[in-house]
Amino acid sequence: MEELGKLRKDAHERISEALRKGDMDEVIRLAQAARDFELAMRNLEATANRIASELESDKGVVAGGVRMNPRNIGIGEKGLSNKAWGNKTRRDWVQKVNAENKDIRLRQVKGVTYTTESGKTVGIACARERTQQPFKWFLGLPNEHLDFVVLLCQPESGPLLDFALPPSFLKRIWSHLSLNNDQRKFHVSQSGSNYELEPKLGFGPINGYLWGSSPPKADLLR
């Protein structure tokens, strides 16, 4: 297990170095390799847990006098619920963008909606990769006018993926996105080194909309 920890650390360090150099192709390649490794480890862990569960009584594990299913213990990464994690991730991302771009100054209007210094409206959605559905992220934003959309997608392993979708792209896809409870739904899926939005609708890869890719996405928000 110690050796596995070293491999994870090395992969994350190499990804961070590629990010610093702005080499997004290398970031995506390394992230894919790291995710393949993590997926293999999750499958191995799931098999081990299944075998251990079969050896246990099917009545479950008794913890503090309460019977619990070991597969359901915990509420998410670092103990945060999906909502709490989303709020923190969104807040951290906005703080980072504001610190690096003094003339943008994203300000929260309500919930997931922000405005820039120039008055542009930005919707920021967050999602984590699900263990049961690897390489997929499901996000939602209010069905209202947005000049820009930012999709923050957290893989099981590797850095946060931040896609900034500009007005021209949103105008083309908005009416085709599914609508549920007055929210437009976004489905991001990874296929090899490509990240695609709504693969069944054929919107194509969105790698070019990664925040760190060229041309600089910050310039679009000014």
Image (cartoon, rainbow, N blue to C red):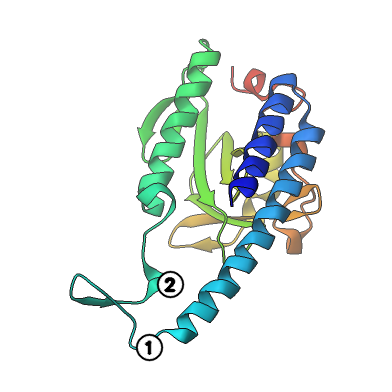
Answer whether labels 2 and 1 touch (C-beta < 8 Å). Answer: no
Q: Position of residue 171 (x, y in %)?
A: 67, 43
Q: Position of residue 75 (x, y in %)?
A: 37, 59
Can residue 219 be seen here? The reply is: yes
Q: Could you say which quadrant of the image residue 213 lies in?
A: top right
Farthest-out residue, bottom = 58
Residue pictured at 52% horizontal, 50% vertical: 127
Residue pictured at 43% horizontal, 45% vertical: 86
56 lies left or right of 61: right
User: Which residue in the structure is indicated by mark 1?
Assistant: 57
Residue 171 or residue 3, whichever sits in front: 3
Q: Position of residue 157 (x, y in %)?
A: 61, 47
Residue 64 sits above or below residue 202 on the image: below
Farthest-out residue, top = 102
Q: Going from the N terminus, do you reach mark 2 or mark 1 first?
A: 1
What amino acid type is highlighted by mark number 2? Arg
Element assignment for label 2: helix
Farthest-out residue, left = 65
Q: Nearer the viewer, mark 2 or mark 1?
A: 1
Residue 84 sits above or below residue 45 on the image: above
Q: Residues within 10 Å of mark 2 (few under 14, many from 20)?
A: few
Q: Which mark is residue 71?
A: 2
Element assignment for label 1: loop
Can residue 133 be seen here? The reply is: no
201 lies left or right of 54: right
Quarter of the image with the C terminus in it: top right
Q: Position of residue 175 (x, y in %)?
A: 63, 54
Residue 107 sits above or below residue 166 on the image: above
What amino acid type is highlighted by mark number 1? Ser
Residue 48 or residue 13, whichever sits in front: 48
Q: Could you say which quadrant of the image residue 187 lies in?
A: bottom right
Question: Separation of disc 2 and disc 1 at Cα?
Answer: 14 Å
